[in-house]
Image: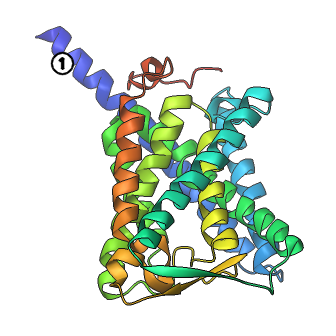
Amino acid sequence: MAIFHYNLLKKKQTQIRNASRILGFVFLIFIVFSFIAFLPFSASVQIWISIVAVLAVSHLCLKLEGNNLNSIGLRLNIGFLSEFAIGILLGLLLILFQALIIFFFDGFTWVRNTQINLGHIIYALISFLAISLYEELLFRGYAFQWAVRGLGNTTALLLFGLFFVIAHLDNPGMTGGTLLLGSLNIGLASVLLGLAWIRTKSLALPVGIHLGWNWTQGSLLGFGVSGEKSQGYWAPVFNDLPHWFTGGDFGLEASLPCTAVCLIMCICFVLWKSKNMRIIAVPHQNRVPRL
């Protein structure tokens, strides 16, 4: 009985330490972002400043623990670049598969957007890279990873999935049926990206998937990206199918095929046997293993 109470107390102490790390990180992010919001720069510049800020806060928190950015999955080597490239390809294929399902059911037709050239597509790639890197650092970086260690995989995935949805609630078109299905799919996408980190212990795969998903959906295929209008190399002209099937102007994240694809991909990640899972399954670790 004494051993049981000791283990319970030790577990509680670990959870408190993990929570304090997360709250400290969130507090610093809030302070820094409050300052960034008043800087006289365009949104395209501010997001890069925000990326540097998240990296700096993450580095500071990790430094206090005796770790570095490598420990949250930022290892800039050949393996990282390979996983990043695989992620881009996977994100591209996931979006393309959703679009083809809707296309084959006569949900829309594609027309060539002659106003878009290679320069537009490359610029959009850089812009979406910034968005993907920023959101993955924020939602699958330091705070998420300590939540996984303190709460376990399932609770952390659901909790940060909820945070991810809340962060997108102000997006254009988040009303009515789109609000319901869009929130569900954005939450599922967050779980998918979280599982990508859990399986690889690297941010390369989730950042790559996020980038490939957004860039293909908006800049290549011309759909909206989570409600934000985008000019693509191709432009979809929607037919009379309901929005819950096509996603409409909001984008594929508000479509039923997106729900199916995200669920299938999440199941694939769950079934994927990875040597990294043994590390993440130990919730009482106080330090992030050096990778």
Residue 202: tell me if it is visible.
yes
Q: Indicate whether 168 appears above or below 76.
A: below
For residue 76, above or below residue 26: above
Please identify the residue farthest to the right as the structure is shown.
119
Question: Which image quarter: residue 29?
Answer: bottom right
What is the count of numbered marks? 1
- Which residue appears farthest toward the bottom when viewing the image? 240
**Which x, y percent locates residue 183?**
37, 70
Number of other residues with Cα within 10 Å of mark 1, as a class: few under 14, some 14 to 19, many 20 or more: few
Quarter the N terminus occupies: top left
Image quadrant containing the C terminus: top right
Residue 209 is situated, as x and y percent measured from the top left of the image, at: 60, 50
Q: Please give the name of the residue rendered at 73% of the width and 33% of the height, measured from the top-left corner.
A: 82
Residue drawn where x is 34% and y is 34% of the image: 152
- Give the quadrant of residue 223: bottom right
**Is residue 220 shown above or below 289?**
below
SS at circle 1: helix
Residue 28 visible at all: no
The residue that disc 1 covers is 5
Viewer-side residue, 5 vs 105: 105
As shown in the figure, which amino acid type bears the numbered disc 1? His
Task: Specify how the rendered protein is coloured.
Answer: rainbow
Residue 167 placement (x, y as % from top left): 49, 70
Q: Judge from the rendering whether residue 173 lies leftward or rightward of residue 137; answer left or right.
A: left
- Residue appearing at x 43%, y 17% in the figure: 278
Residue lying at 19% horizontally and 9% vertically, measured from the top left: 3
Residue 168 screen position, x and y as percent: 48, 73
Q: Is residue 12 left or right of residue 204?
A: left
268 or 134: which is nearer to us?
268
